[in-house]
Image (tube, rainbow, N blue to C red):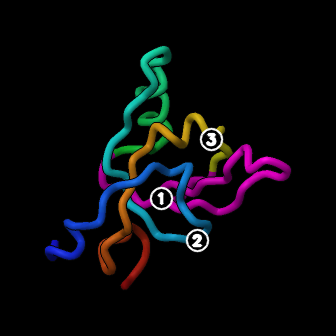
Amino acid sequence: MSQAENAIPAATLDLASIGDALTVQHVEPPHGAPEWARWLEEIGFIVGESVMLMARGLPGGDPLVVRIGQSTFALRRAEAACVRVAPAVRGRQHGREG
């Protein structure tokens, strides 16, 4: 990774822009729901996996339509806020050529 890529701070999936190619950096559940980490990992939110926000529900932006790897899920914003992401590195996205 270049210094520029290292300088970009990770954000959470709930704050992502629609269509941005991202990579999962970390899953951190809320203190009151530690089981969310296991559940999110079971459906594919593992470190290094490609993820993209596809759409937001109307009104209010909930739920979020998210593509993780080759699967598509609807997540609540609270669940998506547990997933830290960073911009995907070109050429390293699963199933895509950069």
Q: Residues within 10 Å of mark 1 (few under 14, many from 20)?
A: many
| Amino acid found under the numbered disc labelled 3 | Arg
Give me the C-alpha separation between circle 1 and circle 2.
10 Å
Pointer 1 and pointer 3: residues touching (CB < 8 Å)? no
Quadrant (top left/top right/bottom left/bottom right) for the C terminus: bottom left
Callout 3: helix, strand or loop? helix
Quadrant (top left/top right/bottom left/bottom right) for the N terminus: bottom left
Q: Is residue 68 above or below residue 44?
A: below
Mark closer to the observer (1, 2) = 2
- Tell how many labels: 3
Q: Nearer the viewer, residue 9 or 63?
A: 9
Q: Which percent across, then down, holds residue 75?
A: 64, 41
Say whether residue 98 is magenta: no
Residue on which disc 1 sits: 51
Give me the C-alpha separation between circle 1 and circle 3.
15 Å
Give the residues drawn in magenta, as a range: 47-72
First in sequence: mark 2 or mark 3? 2
Outermost residue toward the bottom in this view: 98
Residue on which disc 3 sits: 77
| Amino acid found under the numbered disc labelled 2 | Gly
Q: Is residue 85 above or below residue 7?
A: above
Mark closer to the observer (1, 3) = 3
Give me the C-alpha separation between circle 2 and circle 3.
16 Å
- Which mark is drawn over residue 19? 2
| Amino acid found under the numbered disc labelled 1 | Val
Q: Which percent across, then down, holds residue 85?
A: 39, 54
Q: Nearer the viewer, residue 17 or 34?
A: 17
Q: Is residue 2 above or below residue 26?
A: below
First in sequence: mark 1 or mark 3? 1
First in sequence: mark 1 or mark 2? 2
Horizontal side, residue 17 vs residue 76: left or right = left
- Kindly identify the residue that appears in the image at 43 percent across and 71 percent down: 95
